[in-house]
Image (tube, rainbow, N blue to C red):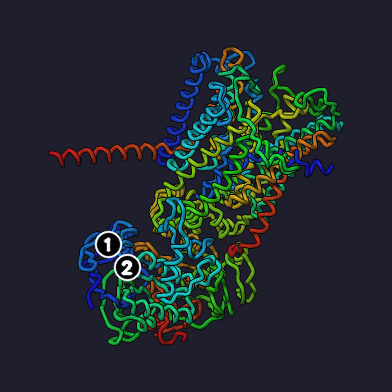
């Protein structure tokens, strides 16, 4: 089998950040090659370079033996490379046919779309590759699995020989995944080459002809599925040098502060994103929530804080039913929130620092009973936050917009921490923060838990989860893959659960 | 801190100054095209606004409604409410004031506050429907309030004609409700000129709003809602309730603006009396960036220009609409980010130079 | 009484009154598809109404007037495009300021050139004539409605068909619809978003130009201050109600125009004119309300 794609020392830098570091890879034509890795391992960046959405900083990409450098998606398309993105590039209110031809319409009479000609061609493709697509149905009426097929046919219609699929199974049911695998095998039998990007171990082992593992922007291994198992793969994928250690005091079992029972929450697309999740957070405990992004963590947090509707189940806080309460009531009860979206949800970039720290604090006594804004106190609080959390600024009157991302994060974290909360829901508190600050914030989290405050820590940094959590709940596919504690909190175990391995669900 | 404030302020000052100069330059050109003398015209404006006999008083007469209308727009825009129906709310407020001012006899101490309140209430109620439509049915409030402007003008015209008993002998514009009672009239500050104590109401309102935003907790919440609704929501602010309240308050103040006009200079309700007062307020709020103190300043400038434009029309051949045009163009120019434009021009120039240099080196 | 509501006079008036709305909204709906909320359509119409009159006056030709109208409207659309697409000014502020500026400019020009306030009439201003369609004109009832309308009316009606074809049968239309639905996806499919936006702005200019021309030289041969009188807003409302679908937008325009036509007919009865004149505006709010209910039921808002 000939090599169809060869990557030689491909590197991509964004400023000082190295997203891909000297990647070498060989992909044989007519095979399914998987690229597996965690979030931030560099998979998407690499693929974007293949499809022309990004250009490599250095290194070479060889396509069928010839050097290529795509400047845009159209160029890549013309050379036979097409990509099915993780987030579908589809038009909801157009038909399947229209979606497929948009941008590559067949013309008749110089001005008009030749739908008949296109239809014939697409029907041929659908027949050849066994995709029974309802060409006149609207995208929004179709189930996700079918939408994905539309994306694949779209790529084939544009003449792709190499099809890249980015996390295709994230949105599929087990049956949908089976269907997809069959389709892929069939495509390969017709001579197509498939690049399969994922973080899911089981799938990779089931479908691949060859596997490349990426970790931190580097290749950690080229393996064949018959030579490895889940454990080995997980270890290649997950984990980095633990630079920081945290002194965690031993915990005694305490009474639950937050009880979640059978929680089901829908995502923006109307499908269940959180499925029958149950867990507890105990007093003074740090419960980590681990999982690859997109497995329901965001929806869970939004539902818990009252910003997303709960379809089923109940949430109890200090034995009080709080399921239907909104953010205001939850805050008044002593639940704080450090959101992941720090610019849109966590702060007001049009306002100065003290107005940002005031949000939430303004609900505390005696603040909220007074008509007049106690500006002195508000400024004081802002100063407290800035000082304690070492925010780099010379005044609390400075606009938040002028702070670095890391400093904005410190303001948000600081504000919520210094409020008199009983439960803190925290999402990715140290994302984008320098190492020194990470250490500091970690210490704050541990200290605050020591003082009896409970923490629900959602993080995509496995290191953070492992270092801080007393117990860890792993979410996979919207369900609880497992809740581990003690010695079980380690990379291997968590990595397996996060990727659907071993103790996962069938 | 001081330094950063001045750096930011410097950019703003440049923007406003450049806009002002450009706009007056355009005005001068238009005057020239029409065969007039720009210097003479602008001098007339200045004289009419500040120097001539009774000019300050006349300016105050115009500054008053400008400020009130500007405040009505400010509180709406500041909290994310796109109330473009201020004109209509002014009309209903004015009509109500004309009715209450005429039909009910009360001592001055009671009559004036009652009239103002009634007018404010009318404006508030008129804003209620668009507010509810937006809240419950997500109907865009810009279009509904715009439509209600026309409804208000026609409705008040109809009610006025009905009340007076229209016999078709005069055109609707010449018909007016009977004059309001003396007890409802605002006192003149500098008789015989039309400046009234309404200016105190205007400044008072501006002051209250300023204090609200600067010193109260509610003011803080209102500002946050306008700047980032999601952030406010997760922070525990009741966003929906705030939205409706602000909408209604904006209508209330607009109604008061109408009242002050009737209880002051006009003394009676005449259909189509207000000619774009609501839009003046909106423009003022936009230029003043929703800052109450800014509204007072810009409103003062606006009133001065309006007064001056009448004088200019009397003394020269220039149509006073030149000033109106300058005002609306000013809004346009102020929204332009001159720094970004300049940067773009510089970058484009650089690119052009680079290409030329490339070409030259190739031929070399 | 029935003849008022359904009489041929009323319906004929409806079609005539709908014409400016139809033309403006046909142009505006292209921009709407590109997610440009143009609240400044009034200014386009008013400026072109004036210049159409002026052109006709100068040349004593309605056709030249039309050219003037379209040209002036294109200039306005250029200004709008530069401000909104390149300077990234707030589209609403620009719209409001342009509406007010247009009023100022046209009134100034009316005074400056013709030394008139209010309205201006002159035998030199030539309007487009009416067209009597043979055969159809002889059909009772329908004939009176359809035949005998001004030339520009027929252009408006034809434009609906034209816009429909462009929107749904050409690659441009398909891609434009895609831009409005999902910009990211459209870009990935190779569509130049900025170019498409500019094209829609210019299309708006052309259509609004014809629309404004109809106002002044579509029969009445005169220009009145603030002639557009909110028609630009009504067109915008029609676009919103019709959700960018030319046929639905057309129907919305007819509804508004119908209430307008009623106003004129009802005036001869003792129903006060103001109440009837209010009808189009109230109708707009009602229709928006109904459209809003349907949208609210269709969508579900997980964030409350």
Figure quadrant of the C terminus of chain C: bottom right
Earlier-in-chain disc, 2 versus 1: 1
Q: Which mark is residue B278?
A: none
Q: Residue furthest left?
A: B364
Q: Which mark is residue A42?
A: 2
Decide: is A152 above or below A358. Answer: below
Tag 2–tag 1 contact (CB < 8 Å) = yes
In this picture, residue C85 sits left or right of residue C234: left
Decide: is B23 above or below C153. Answer: above
* Structural crowding at the residue carrying mark 2, measured as other residues with C-alpha within 10 Å and reported as few (<14), some (14–19) or many (≥20): many
Decide: is A390 above or below C102. Answer: below
Circle 2 SS class: loop
Q: Are marks 2 and 1 on the same chain?
A: yes
- Report x, y in % for residue B238: 63, 56
- Chain letter for mark 1, please: A
In this picture, residue A334 sits left or right of residue B15: right
Circle 1 SS class: strand
Q: Residue furthest front?
A: C135
- Report x, y in % for residue A232: 31, 84
Quickly name the residue at label 1. Answer: A12
Q: Specify whether residue A76 is in view.
A: yes
Front-lying residue, C250 or C91: C250
- Report x, y in % for residue A103: 41, 57
- How many labels were placed on the picture? 2
């Amino acid at each position: 089998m000939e090599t169809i794609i060869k990557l030689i020392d491909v590197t991509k830098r964004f400023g000082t950040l190295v997203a891909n570091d000297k990647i070498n890879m060989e992909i044989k034509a007519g095979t399914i090659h998987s690229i597996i890795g965690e979030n931030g391992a560099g998979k998407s960046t690499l693929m974007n370079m293949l499809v022309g959405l990004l250009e490599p900083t250095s290194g070479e990409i060889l396509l069928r033996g010839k050097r290529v450098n795509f400047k845009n998606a159209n160029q890549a398309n013309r050379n036979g490379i097409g990509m099915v993105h993780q987030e579908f590039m589809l038009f909801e209110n157009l038909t399947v046919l229209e979606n497929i031809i948009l941008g590559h319409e067949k013309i008749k009479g110089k001005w008009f779309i030749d739908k008949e000609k296109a239809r014939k061609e697409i029907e041929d493709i659908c027949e050849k590759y066994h995709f029974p697509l309802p060409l006149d149905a609207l995208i929004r009426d179709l189930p996700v699995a079918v939408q994905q097929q539309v994306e694949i046919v779209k790529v084939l219609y544009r003449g792709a020989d190499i099809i890249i699929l980015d996390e295709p199974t994230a949105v599929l049911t087990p049956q949908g995944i089976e269907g997809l695998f069959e389709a892929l095998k069939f495509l390969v039998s017709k001579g197509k080459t498939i690049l399969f990007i994922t973080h899911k171990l089981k799938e990779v082992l089931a479908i691949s002809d060859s596997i490349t593992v990426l970790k931190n922007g580097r290749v950690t291994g080229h393996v064949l599925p018959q030579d490895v198992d889940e454990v080995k793969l997980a270890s290649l994928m997950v984990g980095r040098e633990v630079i920081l250690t945290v002194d965690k005091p031993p915990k005694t079992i305490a009474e639950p502060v937050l009880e979640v029972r059978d929680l089901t929450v829908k995502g923006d697309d109307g499908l269940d994103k959180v499925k029958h999740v149950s867990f507890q957070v105990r007093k003074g405990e740090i419960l980590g929530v681990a999982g690859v992004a997109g497995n329901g963590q965001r929806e869970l947090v939004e539902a818990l804080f009252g910003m997303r509707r709960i379809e089923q189940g109940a949430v109890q806080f200090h034995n009080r039913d709080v399921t239907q309460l909104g953010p205001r009531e939850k805050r008044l009860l002593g639940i704080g929130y450090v959101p992941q979206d720090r610019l849109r949800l966590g702060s007001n970039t049009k306002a100065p620092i003290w107005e940002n720290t005031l949000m939430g604090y303004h609900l505390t006594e005696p603040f909220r009973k007074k008509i007049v804004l106690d500006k002195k106190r508000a400024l004081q609080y802002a100063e407290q936050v800035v000082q304690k959390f070492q925010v780099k600024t010379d005044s609390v009157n400075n606009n938040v917009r002028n702070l670095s991302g890391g400093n904005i994060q410190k303001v948000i974290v600081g504000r919520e921490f210094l409020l008199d909360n009983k439960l803190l829901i925290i999402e990715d508190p140290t994302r984008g923060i320098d190492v020194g600050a990470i250490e500091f914030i970690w210490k704050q989290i541990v200290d605050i838990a020591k003082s009896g405050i409970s923490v629900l820590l959602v993080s995509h940094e496995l290191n953070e989860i492992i270092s801080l959590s007393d117990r860890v709940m792993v979410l996979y596919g919207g369900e609880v893959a497992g809740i581990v504690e003690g010695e079980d909190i380690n990379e291997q175990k968590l990595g397996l659960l996060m990727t659907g391995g071993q103790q996962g669900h069938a | 801190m001081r330094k950063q404030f001045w750096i930011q302020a410097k950019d703003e000052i440049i923007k406003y100054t450049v806009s002002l100069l450009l706009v007056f330059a355009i005005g001068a050109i238009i005057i020239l095209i029409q065969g007039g003398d720009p210097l003479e015209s602008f001098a007339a404006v200045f004289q009419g606004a500040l120097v001539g006999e009774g000019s300050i008083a006349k300016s105050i007469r115009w500054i008053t409604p400008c400020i009130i209308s500007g405040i009505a727009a400010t509180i709406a825009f500041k909290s994310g409410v796109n109330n473009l129906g201020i004109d209509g709310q002014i009309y209903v407020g004015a009509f109500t004031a004309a009715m209450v001012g005429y039909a009910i006899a009360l001592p001055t101490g009671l009559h004036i506050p009652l009239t103002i309140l009634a007018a404010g209430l009318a404006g508030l109620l008129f804003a209620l429907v668009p507010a509810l439509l937006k809240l419950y049915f997500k109907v865009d409030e810009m279009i509904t309030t715009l439509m209600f402007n026309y409804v208000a003008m026609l409705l008040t015209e109809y009610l006025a004609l009905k009340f007076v008993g229209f016999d078709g002998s005069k055109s609707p514009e010449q018909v007016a409700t009977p004059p309001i009672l003396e007890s409802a009239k605002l006192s003149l500050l500098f008789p015989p000129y039309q400046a009234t104590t309404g200016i105190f109401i205007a400044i008072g309102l501006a002051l209250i709003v300023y204090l609200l935003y600067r010193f109260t907790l509610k003011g803080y919440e209102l500002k946050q809602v306008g700047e980032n609704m999601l952030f406010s929501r997760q922070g525990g602010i009741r966003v929906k309730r705030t939205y409706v309240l602000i909408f209604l308050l904006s209508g209330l103040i607009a109604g008061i603006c109408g009242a002050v006009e009737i209880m002051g200079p006009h003394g009676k309700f005449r259909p189509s009396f207000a000619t774009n007062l609501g839009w003046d307020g909106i423009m003022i709020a936009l230029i003043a960036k929703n800052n109450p103190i800014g509204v007072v300043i810009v409103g003062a400038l606006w009133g001065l220009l309006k007064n001056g434009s009448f004088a200019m029309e009397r003394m020269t051949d220039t149509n006073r609409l030149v000033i109106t045009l300058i005002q609306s163009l000013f809004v346009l120019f102020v929204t332009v980010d001159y720094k970004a434009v300049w940067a773009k021009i510089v970058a484009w120039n650089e690119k052009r130079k680079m290409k030329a240099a490339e070409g030259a080196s190739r031929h070399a | 009484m029935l003849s008022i509501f359904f009489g041929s006079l009323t319906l004929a008036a409806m079609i005539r009154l709908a014409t400016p709305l139809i033309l403006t909204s046909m142009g505006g709906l292209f921009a709407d598809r590109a997610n440009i909320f143009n609240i400044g359509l009034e200014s386009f119409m008013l400026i072109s109404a004036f210049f159409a009159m002026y052109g006709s006056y100068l040349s004593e030709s309605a056709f030249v007037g039309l050219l003037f109208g379209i040209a002036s409207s294109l200039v306005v659309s250029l200004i709008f495009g530069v401000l909104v697409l390149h300077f990234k000014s707030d589209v609403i502020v620009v719209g409001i300021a342009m509406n007010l500026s247009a009023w100022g400019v046209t009134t100034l020009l009316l005074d400056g050139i013709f030394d008139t306030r209010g309205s201006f009439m002159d035998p030199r201003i030539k309007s487009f004539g009416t067209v009597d369609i043979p055969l159809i004109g002889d059909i009772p009832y329908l004939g009176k409605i359809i035949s005998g309308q001004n030339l520009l009316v027929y252009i408006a009606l034809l434009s609906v068909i034209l816009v429909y074809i462009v929107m749904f049968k050409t690659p441009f239309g398909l891609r434009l619809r895609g831009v409005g639905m999902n910009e990211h996806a459209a870009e990935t499919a190779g569509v130049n978003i900025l170019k498409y936006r500019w094209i829609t702005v210019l299309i708006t200019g052309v259509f609004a130009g014809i629309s404004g021309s109809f106002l002044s030289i579509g029969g009445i041969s005169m220009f009145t201050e603030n002639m557009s009188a909110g028609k630009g807003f009504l067109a915008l409302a029609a676009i919103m109600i019709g959700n960018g679908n030319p046929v639905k937008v057309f129907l919305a325009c007819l509804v508004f125009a119908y209430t307008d036509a009623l106003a004129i007919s009802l005036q001869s009865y003792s129903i006060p004119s103001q109440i009837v004149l209010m009808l189009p505006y109230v109708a707009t709010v009602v229709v928006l309300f109904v459209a809003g209910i349907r949208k609210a039921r269709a969508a579900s808002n997980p964030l409350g």
